[in-house]
Amino acid sequence: MTDPIIPNAATRHGWRKSSYSNSEGGSCLEILDGCPPGVPVRDSKSPHGPALLFSPGGWSHFVAAVKCGAFRA
């Protein structure tokens, strides 16, 4: 994997929000599918800010942990 941060996430196109996001704003993550070096993740409130780049395996483990309730809200 290359650099774990994309300084200006707005330079990439095709971001999508979580299906759990709503139209009221809130705290949302966006991911970018089909990015060869990994899975970029950014804060939807800061589209021009940085995005973190996760390995595909690391992202899959994180999503699985969220789905099984490993993190408290």
Image (cartoon, rainbow, N blue to C red):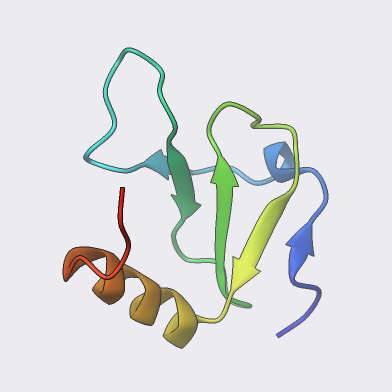
User: Which residue, as the protein is rendered here, is positioned at the far front?
Assistant: 72
* Nearest to the observer: residue 36 or residue 53: 53
Q: Which residue is drawn at 78% across and 80% down?
A: 2
Q: Can residue 19 be seen in this view?
A: yes
Image x and y of residue 45, in percent: 58, 26
Decide: is 6 above or below 27.
Answer: below
Does the rendering let one see residue 15?
A: no
Q: Is residue 55 above or below residue 62?
A: below
Give residue 57's position: percent from left, percent from top. 44, 87
Q: In the picture, which quadrant includes the N terminus?
A: bottom right
- The residue at 43%/36% (across/down) is 28
**Camera-nearest residue between 40 and 67:** 67
The relative height of residue 24 versus residue 13 in the rendered view (above or below) is above
Q: Quadrant of residue 46?
A: top right
Residue at the farthest left position? 68
Q: On screen, 23 above or below 66?
A: above
